């Protein structure tokens, strides 16, 4: 038995350079809490945004980063696996081994366009392409305003392919008091769509 067998499920989490680092941090924490093994794809632009928005400066070396994230999110050994843009032989790059579920959070409109057009210029795009061709569950979470006609057309293309397009637009009926409450609203919606049990946010009329 390998250490992979100790986790309930595998999932791919990709992070691009769109604004909204707090969403992905809360989402990653929630996936770890739910005992999922996470393949983490972090773009260079995402690291810059993370540093700008959250004042977090993560290690550059992958070996150090994996250990850092285990401690940062109280994860089990091997629960968070960071992949680089050059890891073309990683499980997420192949339909025979990639997790059946993937989230892109936050998703830049550039990444959204590349996925909609079937490009595979980097590992994030390739991983999304794999999930699409294998008829898996792909959720993209764009954060942009306003959306151009091009953005909307790309979202329609993805929606027609079965992708869940979930813009980072939290509701307010739960009377949020903090930014974390708004982040939890969106994370809860993602987990609901992936059938992952949670007690993060109240539901309508609760």
Image: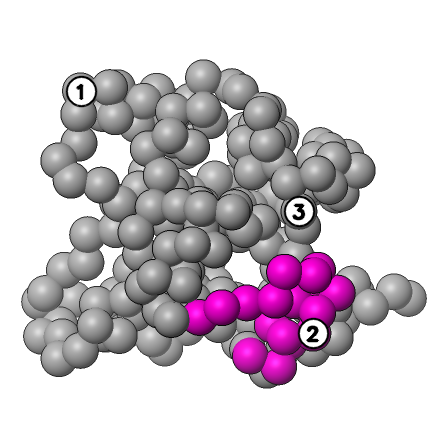
Cα–Cα span, label 1 and label 3: 32 Å
Residue at 13%, 80% in the rendered image: 177
Q: What is the residue that sits farthest to the right in this orientation?
A: 1
Cα–Cα span, label 2 and label 1: 42 Å
In the displayed structure image, the side of residue 54 where residue 96 appears, left or right: right
SS at mark 1? helix
Is the residue 153 above or below the residue 47 in the image? above
- Magenta region, main secondary structure: helix
Determine which residue is flagged by label 1. Answer: 149
Determine which residue is flagged by label 3. Answer: 84
Residue at 37%, 30% in the rendered image: 110
- Percent x, y of residue 63: 75, 65
Is the residue 85 above or below the residue 60 in the image? above
- Percent x, y of residue 81: 68, 60
SS at mark 3? loop
Residue at 63%, 75% in the rendered image: 68
Which residue is at the front of the view, 171 or 18? 18
Q: Earlier in the sequence, mark 1 or mark 3?
A: 3
- Percent x, y of residue 1: 91, 66
Question: What crowding class fits label 1: few (fewer than 14 Cα within 10 Å), some (14-19), or many (20 or more)?
Answer: few
Q: Bounds of the magenta span?
A: 56-72
Q: Earlier in the sequence, mark 2 or mark 1?
A: 2
């Amino acid at each position: 038995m390998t250490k992979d067998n100790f986790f309930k499920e595998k999932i791919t989490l990709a992070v691009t350079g769109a604004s909204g680092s707090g969403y992905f941090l809360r989402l990653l924490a929630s996936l770890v809490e739910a005992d999922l093994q996470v393949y983490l794809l972090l773009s260079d632009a995402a690291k810059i945004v993370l540093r700008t928005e959250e004042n977090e400066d993560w290690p550059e070396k992958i070996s150090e980063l994996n250990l850092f994230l285990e401690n940062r999110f109280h994860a089990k050994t091997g629960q968070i696996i960071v992949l680089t843009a050059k890891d073309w032989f990683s499980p997420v790059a192949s339909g025979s081994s990639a997790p059946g579920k993937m989230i892109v959070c936050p998703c830049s409109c550039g990444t959204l366009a590349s996925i909609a057009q079937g490009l595979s210029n980097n590992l994030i795009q390739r991983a999304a392409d794999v999930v699409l061709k294998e008829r898996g569950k792909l959720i993209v979470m764009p954060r942009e305003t306003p959306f151009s006609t091009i953005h909307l057309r790309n979202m329609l293309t993805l929606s027609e392919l079965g992708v869940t397009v979930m813009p980072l637009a939290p509701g307010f009926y739960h009377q949020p008091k903090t930014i974390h409450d708004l982040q939890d609203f969106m994370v809860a919606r993602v987990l609901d769509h992936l059938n992952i049990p949670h007690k993060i946010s109240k539901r309508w009329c609760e």
